[in-house]
Amino acid sequence: EVQLLESGGGLVQPGGSLRLSCAASGFTFSSCGMSWVRQAPGEGLEWVSSISGSDGSTYADSVKGRFTISRDNSKNTMFLQMSSLRAEDTAIYYCVKEDCKSKLTTFDYWGHGTLVTVSS
Amino acid sequence: DIQMTQSPSSLSASVGDRVTITCRASQSINSFLNWYQQKPGKAPNLLIYAASSMQSGVPSRFSGRGSGTDFTLTINSLQPEDFATYFCQQSYSAPPTFGQGTKLEMK
């Protein structure tokens, strides 16, 4: 059974930093692309960043230069280092597994999410 | 970026009804279109991928069709557990983009 467990969310002041983690199990982690998708309160879904099994990464323009995605395949864990946080980064951040076979950004499993609140 | 537009934004229906939600892409995305269901307080759940392929475990009352720029999600014989918000998402080109969502409410 695929499981994705996020941690690291919380309240942070504008300009601050936070590191999210996602512990994965139930599949061959190193073979699959992984992503972060966020959802502001009462809003829709916004893709944030993706990382391939071989560490290639992409970012939404809204977070480029401020967020860094990484993964540790030996620990089946993905990370999102967030810095220079803004109020508009306030959202639930979901750890998402991409479809391993197609290599497309089809998000077939989602974690429960971790809430990041940026406020003074 | 490819813009995804869903209609309607909200929809009222009754148990047993047949409903259809539409998703339109700002350019052709072939069949690289996915549908997700999200219930309040929960993470989204993949229902349909590649426009018409059903994810494992999804009830057969859900179906998707379309290609190019126009897509539909149809739910036959609505069940109480189907009242939720539905999102489309294109996986044709980076960045992946979502529709704004369609909230399906009980009449």
Image (cartoon, coloured by chain):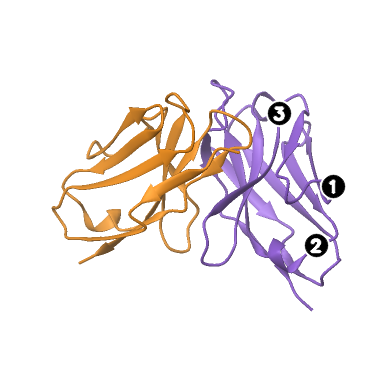
What kind of element bears circle 3? loop
Q: Which chain is orange?
A: B
Q: Quadrant of the C terminus of chain A?
A: bottom right
Q: Nearer the viewer, residue A80 or B68?
A: B68
- Chain to which the residue tagged by mark 3 belongs: A
For the residue carrying disc 2, how many other residues have a C-alpha within 10 Å: few (<14), some (14-19), or many (20+)?
many
- Residue at the location (76% across, 50% down)? A63
Residue A22: % across, % down: 69, 47
**Left or right: B74 with respect to B29?**
left
> Which of the two discs, 2 and 1, labels the residue nearer the N terminus?
1
- Residue at the location (48% across, 40% down)? B89
- As drawn, the residue found furthest toward the left would be B16
- Can residue B58 be seen in this snapshot? no
Mark 1, residue position: A65
Mark 3, residue position: A52
- Give me the C-alpha separation between circle 2 and circle 1: 11 Å
Q: Colour of chain A?
A: purple
What kind of element bears circle 1? loop
What's the residue type where badge 3 is placed? Ser
- Chain to which the residue tagged by mark 1 belongs: A
